[in-house]
Image: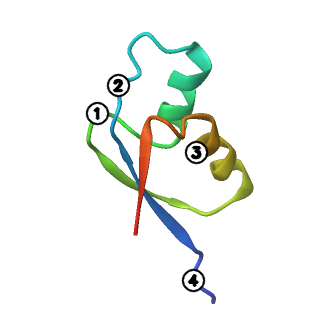
């Protein structure tokens, strides 16, 4: 079994006042609160969600 590549991302800006699509992207990536760090599998769909809200998140090493 090969290990799936993952990405660590941190939510650094609030979803308050954002478009509904952006809020759904935040929820889809698994964020529940501000400054939370989540690990997601590197898939094209997750990359799309990350690109939509790139100004609100920080990608960590």
Q: Name the residue under label 4.
A: 3
Q: Name the residue under label 1.
A: 33
Mark 4 surroundings: few (<14), some (14-19) or many (≥20) residues within 10 A: few
The circle drawn on residue 14 is 2
Q: How far apart are marks 1 and 2 (CA)?
A: 8 Å
N-terminal of the two: label 2 or label 3? 2
Q: How far apart are marks 4 and 3 (CA)?
A: 21 Å
Q: Nearer the viewer, mark 1 or mark 4?
A: 1
Mark 2 surroundings: few (<14), some (14-19) or many (≥20) residues within 10 A: some
Q: Mark 3 points at which residue?
A: 50
N-terminal of the two: label 1 or label 4? 4
N-terminal of the two: label 1 or label 2? 2
N-terminal of the two: label 1 or label 3? 1
The residue drawn where x is 40% and y is 70% is 61
Evaluate if marks 4 and 2 touch, with contact meaning CB atoms under 8 Å apart: no
Mark 3 surroundings: few (<14), some (14-19) or many (≥20) residues within 10 A: many
């Amino acid at each position: 079994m090969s290990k799936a590549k993952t990405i660590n991302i941190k939510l650094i800006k609030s979803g308050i006042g954002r478009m509904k699509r952006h809020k759904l992207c935040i929820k889809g990536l698994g964020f529940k609160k501000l400054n939370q760090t989540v690990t997601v599998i590197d898939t094209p769909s997750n990359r799309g969600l990350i690109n939509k809200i790139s100004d609100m998140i920080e990608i960590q090493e």
